[in-house]
Amino acid sequence: MRRVVITGIGVVSPAGNIPGEFFARLSSGKSFIGEIDRFDASRYPSRHAGLVSDIGGEEVFSKRLIKKLDRFSHMALSASDAAFKDSGVNLDMEDKDRIGIAFGNAIGGWSFAEEELRDLWTHGLREVSPYQATAWFPAAPQGQVSIFYGLKGFSKTIISDIASSHLAIAYAARAIKMGRADVMLAGGTEAPVSPYALLCCNTSGELSRIGNYRPFCKSRDGYIIGEGAAALVVEEMDRALKRGARIYAEIKGFGHTSDGMHPIIPDTSGNGMARAMTLAMREANIAAPEIGMAVPSSNAGKYADLSEGRAFSEIFGSGVDELPLYSPKPQIGNSLGASGAIDAVFACMALSRMETPLLCVDESEFDFFKSGGHDKLIRDNIIINSIGRGGVNACLLIGKP
């Protein structure tokens, strides 16, 4: 099997679109969550979100193209462009039959769709945009990125709730390892801040009504949605070394399990998440004491946090007390299908600096979640978790080669 490394990263987030700036702002402890002001959200039980103020890319993508897109595709293009530029891959010199893309999201592009459906019922079918069909569906970001850059290799769209971009990164790594591609673009994108999308998220009963994202706290009452996108350029390690690429991290292992118990509620024993972490470490040939940091899923739900906390206790035992834990979600919101890729960008930046802020948890159900806020040195390997509704568990393990 060929070894796979991350050589380029791009992010679009409420905390900024430049990875170094994104990391520094999160490390400051500042919150980038606020009340939704794009439409009247006063009647929604939860009306807070992490909002992207500037998607960017206007100097690269034409106004005509952007007009055809929902926000989630626009963000995917912007993050992808940043990742390709960061990687130093010269697409004009590459065999594009050997370059593919794997992207994840959970709900598609409803901002565009809602406006067009409103026009359909109000003004008739002639007023509906001809781009409606290609703007809203979940595979649109993958398609738009492929078309813009002329990528003709192995491509896939993943829809698996919060674990979507975790799985997209895993598919990309597998394509490299198996020789199906030389370079893969992997990531996720999500734009859930629209009237209908917000309604769907609210009806799940999993969103915070008090507007305070407090994972693992006894007083938690759910998560807050956020929008954003992240993209990673991954390639075979020897190839990256030969072209003198900067290597952020090696993708060392991945684990994916299902609880198989309930359509919404995860297994609170934590067994499914623990098995996912075990599979990732087994593939990487790394033991629990070699893990230098963890990025938990941090769903802030009654059951998901119990599941993840118990999984950490099972895997790390007494050593969990010394394991640095941090998640961007309480500061920028839960970007659903994009969250795993955004977490991976953060982890790449943490590895490059060998330090991380700590997750701030007060009155936790678990003793090992200590109140954080100060930077802490980390070791060479990081695990990144996702727990999707219905008990979809994913664990990505990255680290220094």
Image (tube, rainbow, N blue to C red):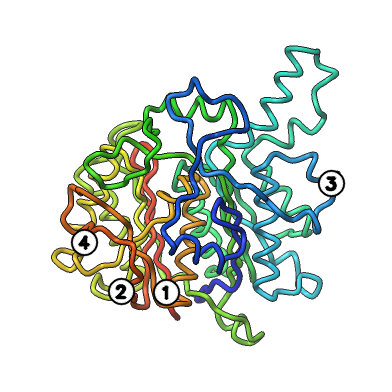
Going from N to C along the chain, the mark reached first, 4 or 2, is 2
Which amino acid lies under the numbered mark 1 shown in the image of this protein?
Gly
Spatial CA distance of label 3 from label 2 is 48 Å
Spatial CA distance of label 4 from label 2 is 12 Å
Q: Nearer the viewer, residue 56 or 385?
A: 56
Residue at numbered disc 1: 399
Identify the residue at horizontal 57%, vertical 49% (top origin): 228
Q: Position of residue 329 (x, y in %)?
A: 43, 50
Going from N to C along the chain, the mark reached first, 3 or 4, is 3
Residue at numbered disc 4: 315
Dot 4: element: helix
Residue at numbered disc 3: 63
Which amino acid lies under the numbered mark 2 shown in the image of this protein?
Ile
Q: Which of marks 1 and 2 is in front?
A: 1
Q: Where is residue 101 in the image (x, y as percent from the top left)?
A: 64, 57
Spatial CA distance of label 3 from label 1 is 39 Å
Q: Do the residues labelled 4 and 2 touch (CB within 8 Å)?
A: no
Which amino acid lies under the numbered mark 3 shown in the image of this protein?
Lys
Which amino acid lies under the numbered mark 4 shown in the image of this protein?
Ile
Spatial CA distance of label 1 from label 4 is 18 Å
Q: Name the image quarter holding residue 115.
A: top right
Residue at numbered disc 2: 286
Spatial CA distance of label 1 from label 2 is 11 Å
Q: Are marks 3 and 2 in contact (CB under 8 Å)?
A: no
